[in-house]
């Protein structure tokens, strides 16, 4: 589980990150990165897993896997401080391996979120 300072919880924060953040699509998710937007110094993550991904069990599994990916990214120092990241899961993301999700999201955040 992500620590409270590393979670996006307000709907306005989700909305602002999706509308004003840099958007990058991978094969299994869409990643929105908005640097210099978090009100705290800690980077924050949010997840959007719609019903098109699957039933409730599948959606919760995908959400847990995305949280594990974000936890791994935080441990490795990505993204930089004061950055909001929203990850939208696409249909088919439940069938992909965790390592593939980690690689895709790491590439996106490394290419889009770190540059200032």
Image: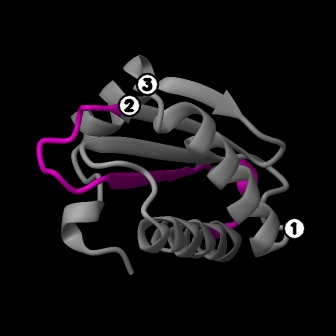
Q: Can you identify the residue that label 3 sits on?
A: 21
Mark 2 or 1, nearer chain start: 2
Q: Can you identify the residue that label 2 sits on?
A: 34
Residues at marks 2 and 1, CA–CA distance in whole angstroms:
28 Å
Residue 111: x and y in percent read 62, 35
Task: Please say whether residue 55 is visible from this viewpoint.
Answer: yes
Residue 56: x and y in percent read 62, 70
Magenta residue span: 35-56
Viewed as shown, does residue 90 lie left or right of 70?
A: right
Q: Note whether 78 is above or below 85 in the view shown.
A: below
Viewed as shown, does residue 75 lie left or right of 110?
A: left
Figure disc tally: 3
Secondary structure of residue under mark 3: loop
- Mark 2, other Cα within 10 Å: few <14 / some 14–19 / many ≥20: many
Q: Can you identify the residue that label 1 sits on?
A: 95
Residues at marks 1 and 3, CA–CA distance in whole angstroms:
27 Å
**The C terminus is located in which quarter?**
top left
Residue 70: x and y in percent read 50, 65
Q: Give the farthest residue toward the bottom.
A: 1
Q: Answer yes or no: do the residues labelled 3 and 2 have beta carbons within 8 Å?
A: yes
Disc number placed over residue 62 in the picture, else none: none
Dot in front, 1 or 3: 3
- Mark 1, other Cα within 10 Å: few <14 / some 14–19 / many ≥20: few
Q: Residue at x 43, y 44 (%)?
A: 85
């Amino acid at each position: 589980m992500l620590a409270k300072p590393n979670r996006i919880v307000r709907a306005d924060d989700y909305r602002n990150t999706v509308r004003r953040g840099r958007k990058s699509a991978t094969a299994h998710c869409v990643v929105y990165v908005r640097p210099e937007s978090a009100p705290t110094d800690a980077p924050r993550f949010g997840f959007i897993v719609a019903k098109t991904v699957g039933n409730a069990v599948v959606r919760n599994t995908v959400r847990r896997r995305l949280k594990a990916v974000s936890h791994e990214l935080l441990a490795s120092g990505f993204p930089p401080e004061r950055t909001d990241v929203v990850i939208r899961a696409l249909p088919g993301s439940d069938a992909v391996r965790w390592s593939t999700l980690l690689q895709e999201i790491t590439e996106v955040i490394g290419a889009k979120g770190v540059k200032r």
